[in-house]
Image: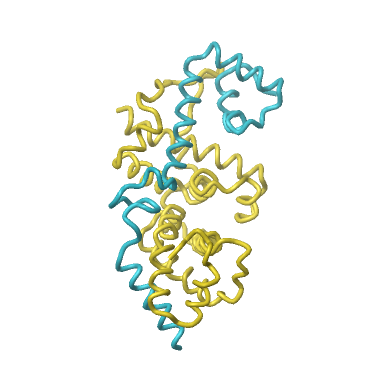
Amino acid sequence: MSIDGSDDAAVVAALQAGDRAATAGFVQAHAGRMHAVARRMLGSEDEARDAVQEAFLRAFQSLHEFRGAARLGTWLHRIVVNEALMRLRARKARPELQAATEQSIDDLLPRYYEDGHRIAPRPAWAESADALLERREVRALVQRSIERLPDTLRVVLVLRDVEELDVKETAALLALSEGAVKTRLHRARQALRALLEKELVP
Amino acid sequence: MMRDICEDVIGFLDDYVSGDLAPEQRAVFEAHLERCPYCRDYLATYRDTIALGRGLADPAHDRAGDAGDAGGGPPAELVEAITASLLAHRRR
């Protein structure tokens, strides 16, 4: 099955007809990316699986709303992002489910002397990002480190830096001002930078 | 207004990397970088951090068996479970 959108309409028709092979192909084609997005946003494997399952069900129930203006993959991406956001909002009311609090990352932000100079600066990393990404254990480290960020920061970093949504879109999805998105993204990047540094520059 | 000190410069890193600094602020920022190797290193690792995040969703960096987006594909039992639930839903 093509996932470039050229036969999205045919896929939707086959799904609506209850075609078993088309359904399996549809799930196979999209579940990986959806699972990765949910996993990164939620920082939890179990919840990510539930979110993907729920997102597929939601998508399936609203196939008649799929207009083909967006690619099927893009449409599904939006549905799983929304599903993960709903779960994060539900989690807000239950702090014990959160990996970390915003305060807990204060240690990861740069500290300064009174004159504005940074305390204990470290050198740049020896390897380029491209070279680092070639290494599987580094990709796993990045993934793990993102999962350690507090929900409120992680979700902004994932939407902006991994999923590459723009500030406006991210602000709308999270019901935040664009300024708040920028502030959180900056904090999230700094915290992630420090978590990575601890491992990359022992 | 940005002062010519590390604390202020680092506070404006995201605006700098996204090209959102006004010309006069950019001038202060870049003049500081010229003189401050620590802030140059911080900027480099800040950019690396962004690139590492982007790399996670980039199929070019996925490898078989990875937890990445395209890599080893979705977990087989997840695909099966979802497919079964969709077909069951349709029958209902």
Residue B74 drawn at (x, y percent): 35, 61
Q: Quadrant of the C terminus of chain B?
A: bottom left
Q: Nearer the viewer, residue A126 or B57?
A: B57
Q: Is residue A86 visible?
A: no
Answer yes or no: is residue B3 visible: yes
Report which quarter residue A195 is drawn in.
top left
Q: Is residue A33 above or below residue A128?
A: below
Q: Please state, as top left, top right, bottom left or bottom right, where the N terminus of chain B lies in the image.
A: top right
Question: Which residue is rendered at x = 62% and y = 16% of the image?
Answer: B4
Chain A colour? yellow
Judging by colour alone, the chain drawn in cyan in this rendered image is B
Q: Nearer the viewer, residue A160 or A63?
A: A63
Vertical relation: A77 (above or below) A65: above
Please state which of residues A36 and B43 is positioned toward the viewer in this rendering. Answer: A36
Residue A161, image x, y percentages: 51, 43
Residue found 35% across the figure and 34% down from its top: A132
Image vertical order of residue B27 relative to residue A137, above or below: above
Can you name the residue that lies furthest to the top here? B35
Residue shown at 63%/50% (left/top)?
A171
Residue A127 percent coordinates (x, y): 35, 27
Q: With respect to residue A34, does A53 lie above or below?
A: below
Q: Nearer the viewer, residue B64 or A106?
A: B64
The percent position of residue B3, horizontal first and vertical second, equals 65, 19
